[in-house]
Amino acid sequence: MTSPWPNCASAGKSNNPDELTIYIAPGQRHDGLVGFIFGGMGMFIMDGGVGQELVKRKGGAPGPLWSAMAALEDPESLTDLHRDFLEAGGRLVTLNTYSGTRQRLRRHGVEDIFAKLHQASMECALRARDTARCDHRADVKIAICLPPLMASYHPETHPSADEALESYGEIISLHEENADLALAETMSSLAEGRDVVAASAGHKIPLWLSFTLDDQDAALLRSGEKLSDAVTLRGHAEAILLNCSVPEVITEGLKELTGTSLPMGAYANGFTSVAALEPGKTVAVLEARKNLGPEAYADFADQWVAMGASIIGGCCEIGPEHIAELARRHG
């Protein structure tokens, strides 16, 4: 598969706002995900948080697998949401399989639906891309979701390296024919990051690697390990990002990424805290912030862009309205 941005051989940013300009990160090779466009196309804007938005639209309390099961139980709503993110200005559809790993499905006694769930999720993503009413539809990319295999924010649940490599490799193999990139997101520890990089090394699809930070200390992953050490694990990753932490901490954490020479990105969550979320439980125990509407969130994104981020989007509690504001300012 080709990378989300075309190769480019010139660099620099023009002072003319009407002129299309290309930036190449210092020291980057010109044969991968190295060109990102500032000017006419703007930043690369991702989608937002699918799971929380599905809960808002459907109402009621979420079940343990509420998000992933949408592809099987309510594919129209899932497709509509993917499409809404695109029509708001997003250029990425991330597969709705975050909680659809074999390990998570096995915990709830439904591992047998693994392949069917992944197939249905890809069908929803492709349908949304192909029916979106937006001028940039031809530029929309599909991302394979490579999440923590057992639980978010709990690196102690991460399986053995052998199991992790097999699991991540299986997910990539299922989707790489139809996807444009693999997004390893919410990596909470060095082990998670190292294993997902190793698992994707044998595949041609580009990898974006995203870590989640301690909400009290931007220098640390949720495991307590240093973000600076995590950055050294990036291997063949073509972009490095921070996600699913409060935006204030992500702003501080981006300072650590500026020396990598890779395209960097950020997509925060809108929770007050994730401390209450235990493995196997639902986000019903978490509280959404009341001070992070579309404009407030975009104000944080403005800082990320000023720091050099070329990929911006949203995680949990960040909906189409937020993405629309990002697109208005940076699309």
Image: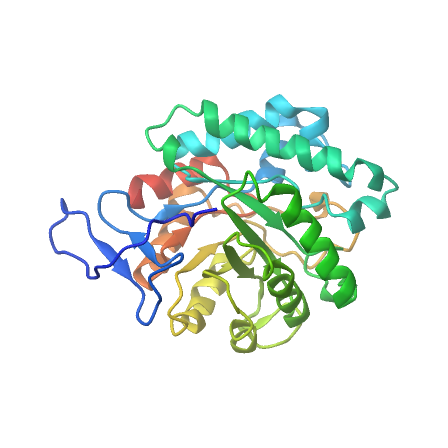
Q: Residue at x 53, y 60 (%)?
A: 209
Q: Is residue 147 above or below residue 82?
A: below
Q: Residue furthest right?
A: 109
Q: Is residue 128 above or below residue 23?
A: above
Q: Residue at x 68, y 24 (%)?
A: 74
Residue 330 left/right relative to 96:
left
Report x, y in % for residue 113.
80, 35
Hey, which quadrant is residue 245 in on the image?
bottom right
Report x, y in % for residue 210.
54, 59
34 or 302: which is nearer to us? Answer: 34
Report x, y in % for residue 326.
37, 43
199 or 284: which is nearer to us? Answer: 199
Residue 108 left/right relative to 17:
right
Q: Residue at x 60, y 24 (%)?
A: 77
Report x, y in % for residue 252.
44, 68
224 or 5: which is nearer to us? Answer: 5
* Tally of marks: 0
Q: Which quarter of the figure is the C terminus placed in?
A: top left
Hey, which quadrant is residue 109 in on the image?
top right
Q: Residue furthest left?
A: 16
Q: Is residue 56 visible?
A: no
- The scheme the figure's colours follow is rainbow
Residue 311 left/right relative to 223:
left
Hey, which quadrant is residue 90 in on the image?
top left
Q: Is residue 161 visible?
A: yes
Residue 15 left/right relative to 173:
left
Q: Is residue 174 above or below residue 197?
A: above
Q: Residue at x 74, y 37 (%)?
A: 115
